[in-house]
């Protein structure tokens, strides 16, 4: 499942323990840094919390009830140079923040989750940052760092000078419904638009080359995304939990689909993968309940763990000959899967696929023996639970060289222990049907066809 960043969990779900956690971490750091001259004990000035790091000041927190913060340039004779990551993330009443000339470093998500924040102001003498219409930018206006979550506008056009949309730049901006990204942007960093739940439209221009991890994750309303041909990489979880996204085409230059890339895109019915894709990451399409059609190109060499788990509408699937590695259980819970084809060279155990009841599997093992396995003894509503005694038996149609001797192995677990269920020999036409009741005492669920000569 999708796992939010640790600090977000700690600070947003357990705010009452935030200060205790902060103090505890500081004590741990002090104990680990004995002998140094660095002081890590938190101190306060007005609504702000800070610490002294040798010769400069780091802003760490603020009073959650404060409405306006003007960060001083100097505290106790030392310059305020840093605002640490998530520093103001619990300041739900904060509406305005002023950053002085002295600040040269602002951590990721420093103003994230500030639901009332409407304006971030940077004093003119600052050499690292600037503000435009209340939005925090780098000094050269090339990177958009933070869009205040409390702004009331429903539409926003990214300024022309921007080339990078920074980490968590629009994180949790629920008020926005439309964002326009102008040409010139080449990179969208991690979680840049994560949890913009009301966003229905976003335009992405040519020239963008990378989409960072979780960049467009957790959207409720976004139905369609058009990706430019310039994109070469799609990061981990980039479109995970986009609940309304119904179709998307992956540009030709993309070579890999990251882990969790389209995780739980429940409305996604169709996706086109280009011929350049070589890998499909772990959990990449897990929980895509409506996905009924996907073609895996002949360039793919790896399909990850749980890649298509619970794709309930998927009826057939072919793994191309190019695939040389397959993660465990990529099709578990695909209850509508009717047939499934494996490449002839793939060296894996059929049972590790966790194919649902009544699906047909075409498989050829290392020795050239093929099998179509029909798991008829399984309940279609629970792909790995056997039916009560008296249900239909197992039918395994095995193809291979005439007169080859085979053994059918069975087990109650994919990890074994495996034991012999039946011996058989392939007939003159190169096939044989092996059938019978499963071993009820063994609780057999998984079967293998193995050549013995």
Image (tube, rainbow, N blue to C red):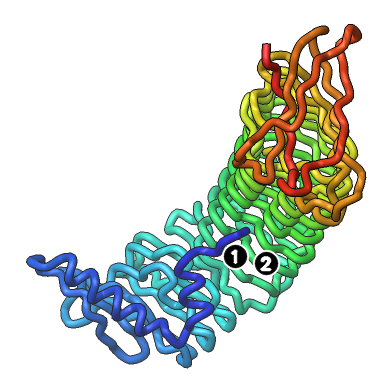
Residue 320, quarter of picture: top right
Task: Please tell me which of labels 1 and 2 falls first in the chain.
Answer: 1
Q: Percent from the top left, x then y, of residue 51?
A: 25, 77
Who is closer to the viewer here, 273 or 62?
A: 273
One can see residue 312 in this view: yes
91 lies left or right of 398: left
Q: Please report contact status of discs 1 and 2: CB closer than 8 Å, yes or no.
A: yes
Q: Residue at x 53, y 88 (%)?
A: 93
Question: Looking at the image, is 9 positioned above or below residue 49?
Answer: above
445 lies left or right of 336: left
Within 10 Å of the Cα at label 1, are there few (<14), some (14-19), or many (20+) other Cα atoms?
Answer: many
Who is closer to the viewer here, 197 or 424?
A: 424
73 lies left or right of 122: left
The residue most toward the left is 35
Q: Residue at x 64, y 50 (%)?
A: 260
Mark whose residue sits in front, 1 or 2 = 2
Q: Percent from the top left, x then y, of residue 178?
A: 75, 63
Question: Looking at the image, is 361 positioned above or below residue 64?
Answer: above
Residue at image mark 2? 196
Q: Which residue is drawn at 49% across and 90% down?
A: 67
One can see residue 297 in this view: no
- The numbered mark at residue 170 is 1
């Amino acid at each position: 499942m999708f796992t939010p960043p640790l600090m977000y969990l700690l600070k947003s779900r357990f705010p009452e323990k935030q200060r205790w956690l902060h103090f505890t971490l500081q004590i741990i750091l002090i104990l680990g840094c004995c002998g140094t001259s660095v002081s890590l004990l938190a101190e306060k000035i007005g609504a702000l919390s800070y610490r002294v790091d040798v010769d400069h000041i780091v802003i760490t927190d603020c009073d959650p009830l404060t409405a306006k913060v003007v960060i001083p340039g100097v505290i106790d004779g030392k310059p305020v140079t840093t605002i640490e990551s998530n520093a103001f993330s619990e300041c739900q009443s904060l509406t305005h923040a002023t950053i002085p000339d002295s600040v040269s470093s602002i951590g990721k998500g420093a103003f994230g989750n500030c639901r009332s924040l409407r304006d971030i102001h940077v004093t003119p003498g600052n050499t690292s940052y600037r503000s435009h219409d209340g939005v925090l930018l780098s000094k050269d206006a090339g990177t958009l760092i933070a869009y205040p979550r409390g702004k009331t506008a429903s539409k926003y056009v990214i300024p022309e000078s921007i080339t990078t949309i920074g980490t968590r730049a629009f994180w949790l901006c629920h008020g926005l419904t439309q964002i326009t990204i102008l040409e010139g942007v080449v990179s969208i960093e991690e979680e840049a638009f994560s949890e913009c739940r009301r966003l229905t439209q976003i335009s992405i221009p040519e020239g963008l080359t990378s989409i960072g991890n979780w960049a467009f994750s957790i959207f409720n309303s976004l139905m369609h995304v058009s990706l430019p041909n310039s994109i070469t990489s799609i990061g981990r979880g980039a479109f995970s939990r986009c609940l309304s996204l119904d179709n998307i085409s992956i540009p030709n230059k993309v070579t890999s689909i990251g882990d969790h890339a389209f995780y739980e895109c429940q409305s996604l019915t169709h996706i086109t993968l280009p011929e350049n894709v070589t890998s499909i990451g772990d959990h990449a399409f897990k929980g895509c309940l409506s996905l009924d059609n996907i073609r895996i190109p002949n360039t793919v060499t790896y399909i990850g763990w749980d890649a298509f788990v619970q794709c309930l509408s998927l009826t057939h699937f072919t793994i191309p000959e190019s695939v040389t590695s397959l993660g465990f259980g990529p099709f578990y819970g695909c209850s509508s899967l009717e047939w499934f084809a494996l490449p002839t060279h793939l060296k894996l155990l059929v049972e590790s696929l966790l194919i649902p009841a009544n699906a047909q599997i075409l498989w050829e093992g290392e020795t050239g023996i093929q099998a179509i396995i029909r798991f008829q003894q399984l309940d279609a509503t629970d792909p790995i639970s056997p039916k009560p005694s008296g249900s239909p038996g197992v039918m395994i149609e095995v193809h291979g060289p005439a007169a080859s001797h085979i053994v059918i192995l069975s087990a109650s677990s994919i990890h074994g222990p495996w034991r012999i269920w039946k011996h058989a020999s392939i007939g003159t036409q190169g096939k044989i049907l092996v059938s019978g009741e499963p071993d009820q005492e063994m609780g057999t669920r998984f079967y293998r066809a193995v050549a013995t000569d």
